[in-house]
Image (spheres, rainbow, N blue to C red):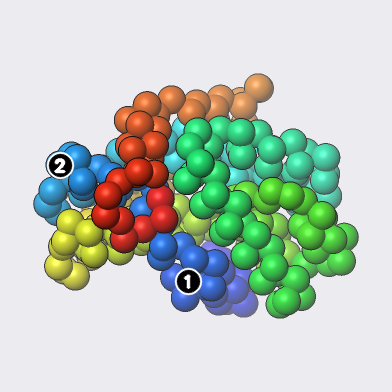
Amino acid sequence: MTALPQLISLLHLASPALPIGGFSYSQGLEAAIDCGIVHDAASAGRWIQDNLTHVQAACEAPVWLLLYRAWRVGDLAAVREWNDWFHATRETAELRLETEQMGWSLARLIAQMSWGDEPMRNALTQMSPICLPTAFTAACVALDIDARDGLAAYAFNWAENQVAAAIKAVPLGQVAGQLILRALHTPVREMVEQAWQRADAEPPQLSTFSPMLGLLSARHETQYSRLFRS
């Protein structure tokens, strides 16, 4: 069981109120709505769960674990390597700018909050660009948050932002959004275990194959009317 101080720290770190700008991104969801792929609560739930289980679990989540482990042992070379690898997998300008902006904002917050030791904060300051998973895992290590707990919170925070975007853009009611989130409890747990297996493989089993997401993200860059930055 997670100790109470670490649980409170994790709730703080994964809160939608954390000032890193997650509310301003939809990660292609708004383009899926514009194209009619997502049009109601059922299709929004399918879109979010598919991205969680087939995109997040295959790439971002195992990379998150690899970054966490590198921070934990102080292997800054591995941190930089996986940060740069993840940045290179962002296949559109919007997705790159999203992870850069949120990563920079969280790294700045880590410095302002004095989380972690000075070498960690210096490494974050010197890294450019810095991706969101890199900064988030640094914060988890600094706050002594367990890897599985941290990854589950990271994934659920992503899902919360997706649901919030769907509520605004489909639009959906608040209860419909909560039902989508409730249905994601089990997929989030399963994603964490799948990510663990992928990260433990030698070499790590990573896949960035998500053509629909890439196409819709690219379309969003020139979409006529937009609420979100991605």
- Compared across the picture, whether 28 is left or right of 9 comes to left
Q: Position of residue 12 (x, y in %)?
A: 54, 74
Q: Measure the C-alpha gap from mark 2 to mark 1.
A: 30 Å
Amino acid type of disc 1? Ser
Is residue 213 visible in this depiction of the protein? no
- Compared across the picture, whether 180 is left or right of 5 comes to left
Q: Residue furthest top?
A: 203
| Residue at screen point 56% across, 59% down | 102
Residue 54 found in image quarter: top left
Is 12 situated above or below 49?
below
Give the residue at mark 2.
Answer: 36
Is residue 209 visible in this depiction of the protein? yes
Q: Position of residue 126 (x, y in %)?
A: 82, 54
Give the residue at mark 1.
Answer: 15
Amino acid type of disc 2? Gly
Q: Nearer the viewer, residue 64 or 8?
A: 64
For mark 2, does the 10 Å Cα neighbourhood hold few (<14), some (14 to 19), or many (20 or more) residues? few
| Residue at screen point 61% across, 38% down | 86
Q: Are marks 2 and 1 in contact (CB under 8 Å)?
A: no
Mark 2 falls on what kind of element? loop
Query: If the image is split into quadrants, where does the N terminus sit?
Result: bottom right
- Compared across the picture, whether 111 is left or right of 211 comes to right
In primary-sequence order, the first of circles 2 and 1 is 1
Is 68 situated above or below 18?
above
Mark 1 falls on what kind of element? loop
Q: Nearer the viewer, mark 2 or mark 1?
A: 2
Q: Position of residue 7 (x, y in %)?
A: 55, 71
| Residue at screen point 79% across, 60% down | 125
Q: Position of residue 178 (x, y in %)?
A: 23, 65
Q: Residue furthest right?
A: 119
- Compared across the picture, whether 80 is left or right of 52 comes to right
